[in-house]
Structure formats: structure tokens, C-alpha cells
Image: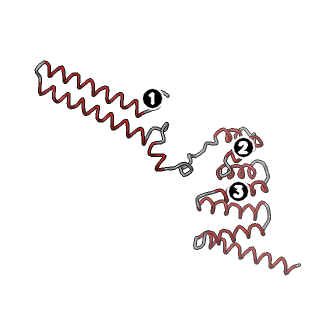
Amino acid sequence: MSDVTEPHKFGFKILAGFGAVFVVIGSVLGFLGLGVFANVISTAGFAGIAVGIVYYFVTLFLVNPATDGLLAVLAPQGQSTKKPKGYSQIEALVMQSRFEEAAEAYKREIETDPDDAEAMHRLARLYLTHLDSPADAGIFLAKARDAAVADKAKLGFSVQLVDLYRTKLNDPGRAMVELRRIIDTFPGTAQAEGAKRELHELLEARKADLDRQ
């Protein structure tokens, strides 16, 4: 690996190199009898070397991605934050109307990372908006809800599922199950209160249907 990709080495060489040059210059000035200037420049040179050493170890442990250093202690394996994924190549397929290929690409992403809620959500949206398959959209929206870590994301996916069940799939039973999930999982929120009202409406509609039969 080159020094350009290892800042702890590259920076140390620069700082220590200049420091050494200043020490040599100070020595020469001292030899010429310019003691005051020699002391100042020599001191600056030694300071540069010291800073270079400090820089080396700071960047080695805190910055350099090629080493475990303190990051391995502060963020042990399996607990580090995942970097956001990019889906530009798959979205390019969507822009080219190659929807089936895009769907397969998202499925491969999910197979590689079964917890990739974002890929599941994008696939669900693809099924809903371009592949005319709301049933498949519901499957992957539910998977995204289960895989999501943040409560806000889980709630968002649940709300989308309720709308999907009611409008696209005409499945009030599954909509009611999802509404109950929202009520039980997010009590006291505005969404839970709205879910209660919506659930009441669905129950009243079901009761009216039974009365007409």
C-alpha cells in the first residue's frame, strides 16, 4: 500500500523531514557562531519531529482505515455502523424500463444481506409502481418492516402496508392486523391514535356487511 493511502506514514515523513532539515540548519548556524538563531531553528526542528511522531500515532489509531487501532476497541466487530449502500446501478435499470432486471438485482442484494430493509422497500415500490404486482409489494414491505432497526422506519412501513391492503389488495382483514400492530407497538403516538380510528371504521364496515347478509 502506498504512503498516500497511509496518512500516518505520509504525514510523519513530511513533518519529521522538515524538522530534521531545521535541526541541520540550526547546527550549521551554531557552527557559524549564530547561537541565537541556531537555538530557535533547532528548537523548531525538534518540535517538528515531535509533532510528526504524535501525528503518526494519532492517525495510525484513529484515522487510518488499514489498521484496527482504537476503532476496533471503540466499535467491536459486528457493532459498527453500516455505511449506506448505493443502488445507482439498479436504479439505472429502472430508468431504462428494465424493471424485471432491476427486481432481480434487488433480490440479489437481499440474498447477500437479508437485513437490507432499504433494498426490500425499493423492491416493494418497484413491484407496486412498475410491475403491477401489489401482492409482491406487500410481501417485501412486510419484510422491510421486520428488518428495519429504527422505530420510525418500522412505523412508516406499517402505514404503507395498511394503505396497500386497503386500496390495492382490498384486504381489510390484513389491514386490521397491521393497524393493531401499530396500536400495540407505538402506543401514545399520533399514528397509533389514527390507527385506532381507522380500525374502528373497518370494524364498523365489516359489521355492516355482516348485517346485510
Mark 1 crowdedness (10 Å alpha carbons): few <14, some 14-19, many ≥20: few
Left or right placement of residue 103 versus residue 186 in this view: right
Give the amino acid type for the residue marked by disc 2 in the picture. Arg
Q: Earlier in the sequence, mark 3 or mark 2?
A: 2
Q: Which residue is mark 2?
A: 108
Name the residue at the bottom extreme: 211
Check the picture and name the quadrant holding the C terminus.
bottom right
- Give the label, 1 or 3, closer to the camera: 1
Q: Which residue is mark 1?
A: 4
SS at mark 2 in the image: helix
Q: Residue at x 54, y 50 (%)?
A: 81
Residue 212: x, y in percent?
Answer: 86, 79
Corner quadrant of residue 186: bottom right
Corner quadrant of residue 183: bottom right
Give the camera-side residue of 97 and 52: 52
Q: Which residue is mark 3?
A: 143
Mark 3 crowdedness (10 Å alpha carbons): few <14, some 14-19, many ≥20: some
Q: Residue at x 74, y 45 (%)?
A: 103
